[in-house]
Image (cartoon, rainbow, N blue to C red):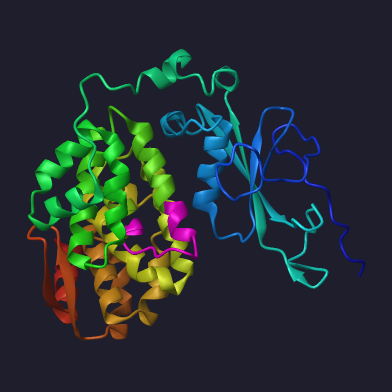
Amino acid sequence: MKPKIPKPPLCPFCGQLIERPRLLPIGLSEYEAGECSCGAVYVCDPTGFSRGAVFLEAIVLACKGDWNLALDLIPDEDYREIWLENYDPETHTIPGEPIFEGRKIRSALCFIKLAEDLQELSGNRHHKPQTLTQSKETTTPSKRLTRNEAEELLKKDQLQELIELVVSNPSNLQVLQKLLYHPDEALRKKAIYCLGQVGKNLANTKPHKISELLKKLIYASTDSASSPWGALEAVGELIAETGERFSIYVKNLFAFLKYPEYIPYVLPALERIAMKNPSAFKKGPFLRLLDLFPRLSSQEQAMVIRIFTWIRGKELLSLKNTLRPERVRIYDNESFQFKEHYINELWSEYERSCYE
């Protein structure tokens, strides 16, 4: 069988050959990038595991280095994003095989193309079109928080004050996002709750802010250099609190179930969605949980049992013989404390919900 001949990389927007990515004078980061004659920009992810950082690099590069403008853009309206997989930086080709010339091919190219009316205007904030000016602040924003200030508010349980500070000045979202990786689990949980409440408040007035936050959290979780600790749970909390608006991201959460190391973070996220937004939850392939259930730990089984309790799903009933009758700790978002439960008790509650 003849080996596949490597193909040159083509721009997914116009089909033209693209030049080899290189470090650009703009100096945004260490990632190599390029620009197609059609106006699309592209950035190389050399490892295949830095999607979040590479996406942000590409969107900021498309905006000529204007970070604030980049965060204002609305996906599929102000820009389009396409990934070109299996790129080999050494030969500047698409080999079409997982191993080429003895090397594993992991790299990818992220292409971003702004809408036509934005390409000439990027980098010129005072001429933004209507889609962007709608997101301007109509009131004087509150103070910019430091990480230490936000952390102190969480420690003192001044959650409502923190929520109000972020809602009135959405630039504080970045500070709150950083606390999702705090080593104190209880503090992380409070940060997750606050993000959900912020999303609930901003979903109608600044939906693009929440959409971009969701994308950043999902991309960051795929980065092997960072921990998914609170990021995936925050995705769940945001979907749980915002009705149908961001239910499209439920499928992204289910995709992480293929990787065992993500399961402890995905299941609590799905449980919150099932509890508060069951219609959005059911838009995902939730029956996958049935195949996983017998192999899960007691803590993880508890999450699945609660999920099927909230949605009143009888599909789990046939798996009673695979239960691990142990005691588990589950976080309660009402009291902001961990509470102990027995698996058998959770199962009994689940059975009752099926026949009520």
Q: Image height check: is 284 above or below 1?
A: above
User: Can residue 277 be seen by looking at this rendering?
Assistant: no
Q: Nearer the viewer, residue 267 or 107?
A: 107
- Where residue 330 appears, as percent x and y from the top left, is 18, 70
Relative to 24, is 331 on the left or the right? Answer: left
Q: Is residue 219 magenta?
A: yes
User: Can residue 71 be seen by looking at this rendering?
Assistant: yes
Q: Is residue 165 magenta?
A: no
Residue 174 image-quadrant placement: top left
Q: Image height check: is 304 above or below 270?
A: below
- Where residue 131 appears, as percent x and y from the top left, is 43, 20
Residue 301 image-quadrant placement: bottom left
Q: Image height check: is 229 above or below 245?
A: below
Relative to 16, is 300 on the left or the right? Answer: left
Relative to 197, is 29 on the left or the right? Answer: right
Give, as a single range, the part of the protein colored magenta: 218-233
Q: Report the residue at 7% width, 60% height from top.
A: 335
- Where residue 319 appears, as percent x and y from the top left, is 32, 78
